[in-house]
Image: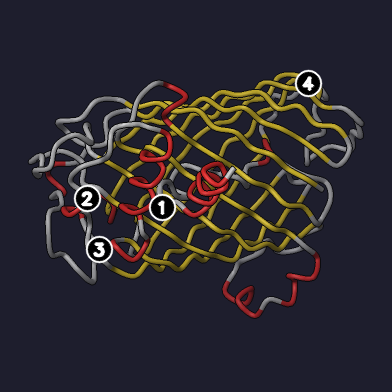
Amino acid sequence: MRRLILFVIGILSSSSLYSQEINNYSTLFDVRDSSYTRICYDNDLFRGTDRFYTQGIGIDVFSSGLKRNPVNIVLLRLKNSDRDRFGIEFRTHGCTPSTILSDSVLIGDRPYAGVFSIGAVRTSQQAERKLRLTSQLEIGVIGEAAFGEQTQTGIHRITGNDLPLGWQHQIKNAPIVNYTLRLEKGTPIQIPSIFNSTVNTQAKFGTFQTNVSAGIDFSLGRRNHPFSETKHRVEYYMYSQSAVLLVAYDASLMGGIANRDGYHLLYSEINPLVLKQHVGFVFAVPHFSIALDFAFISKEIKVGVPHSWGGLRLTIY
């Protein structure tokens, strides 16, 4: 029992993966209630690998009481919005090279990186125009202070897996301050309660990630779309998220802006254009939903390979 408790604590506190991949605020995962809690877990173990984006945890708490959060003053909203939601988020993530069994720096490979952040979130919606704006402000740390080495080593020791080597070469301590804007627009291609689609554009800028992306989302099945008036008690649908990402800066690859000591990659060593694909399934009943997700990403670094992982979302409302 003691080992089980330590394992669970390790999972919840691990510095493995970050909002870099976990996107909880797409209309695909909409919740009608203004108050809910969502827990997400990503791991490439579901694909039988242990490299690159290797694990991520996200916890979101939305409540009408968070409308009074003073940080909300910097979060944008749509003019004449008919529904605003307010939340706080916790993110932790960790990245590793292509192998965790080398004690030396693998030149040109992805560095070790542990990340932890907290943030404030606002979603603003105009249902009639089929628009949603999400704004986020996140602060945190990348580097040794995120305890990525201790956590991954502890989990591998408990589970009997190979202990990771090379964490001494991880990205050095640096602060994270990042701002994100995401705009979604419903398309004319809709079959109410059966098929829905939205297009989106997103921009991130700050000391952790600076990039822009564009994408399209589809869902097929029985679903309460946020831009419609349907009220199904039970929902079940498949979804697809496709996006192309233009990267200007990524501290988990290139080191923190405030601390460039130690091993990190140059911009010329990363791929500035990245393709991402998520497919999954959502099942929801009153007060609870579960989503299973499979993700694929093209090469982030020039000497790397494409990567994939699995994910799980649990929402209580």
- Structural distance between the alpha carbons of marks 4 and 1: 41 Å
- Disc 2 vs disc 1: Cβ atoms closer than 8 Å? no
**Where is residue 293 shown, x and y percent of the image?**
57, 28
Element under disc 1 = loop
Location of residue 245 in the rendering, given as x and y in whole percent from the top left corner: 37, 40
Please state, as top left, top right, bottom left or bottom right, where the N terminus lies in the image: top right
- Labels 3 and 4: the sequence-earlier one: 4
Kind of residue at disc 1: Ser
In terms of depth relative to the viewer, which is nearer, 250 or 200?
250
On the picture, is 246 further left or further right than 21?
Answer: left
- At x 41% / y 30%, what residue is drawn? 44
Asked whether the residues under the numbered discs 2 and 3 touch, taking CB atoms below 8 Å apart as contact, a structural biologist would say: no
Q: Nearer the viewer, mark 2 or mark 3?
A: 2
Question: In this figure, which residue is indicated by the disc labeled 3?
Answer: 256
Q: Which residue is mark 2?
A: 167
Distance between the alpha carbons at the discs numbered 2 and 3: 16 Å
Q: Residue tagged by mark 4?
A: 191
Q: CA distance from mark 2 to mark 1?
A: 12 Å
Q: Quadrant of residue 244?
A: top left
For this orientation, the residue located farthest to the bottom is 70
Marks 3 and 4, how far apart at CA: 46 Å
